[in-house]
Amino acid sequence: MRRRWFERRLSRLPLHETRGLTELGSPYGGWTIPGALIEPSWICYSVGAGGDIGFDLELIERYGVTLRAFDAVAGYVDDAAEQAAGEPRFSAHHAAIATVDGPLRMQVTHDPHSRSVSSAGLYESAEFVELPGRTLESLMDELGDDHVD
């Protein structure tokens, strides 16, 4: 019910065009960003890569950033690496972002066409899995990043 309430409220949210904002990615997996602020030296973390990394790849292509994608679902990580086709500024990592390092209990989606999981109880499902949870700090340490833009 919480997911349905959220989706209904979001669909009624009025959007206003604002100068300096750029839309990247597909209608499904795209985002609106402040494009004029982004610099090629940026290190970007994309949390929840899912099945569509068009936004991530366009961000790299257009702005020259380094992008590290994370997903709790190993299959999505494999798909992302395949979609990136060896792009040297892109890397995909198997992890769910968490407040502490360690196993994270996540609910499996009720949608048979999706592999998504949620630690926030978004789905109409009683199925759960345990996946690797990682803090941003530990991921940054592991990847050698002293900052994230």
Image (cartoon, rainbow, N blue to C red):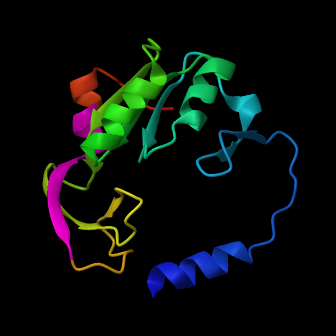
Q: Residue at x 34, y 68 (%)?
A: 109
Residue 136 lies within the magenta run: yes
**Rendered view: 22 above or below 68:** below
Between 82 and 29, the residue placed more toward the observer is: 82
Between 31 and 25, the residue placed more toward the observer is: 25
Residue 138 lies within the magenta run: yes
Q: Quadrant of residue 126?
A: bottom left
Q: Residue at x 66, y 43 (%)?
A: 26
Image x and y of residue 82, in percent:
40, 25
Residue 67 in sight? no
Q: Residue furthest front?
A: 112
Q: Residue at x 46, y 84 (%)?
A: 2
What segment carries the magenta color?
127-139
Between 143 and 116, the residue placed more toward the observer is: 116
In this image, 39 relative to 17: left or right? left
Image x and y of residue 68, in percent:
41, 29
Q: Residue at x 83, y 39 (%)?
A: 20
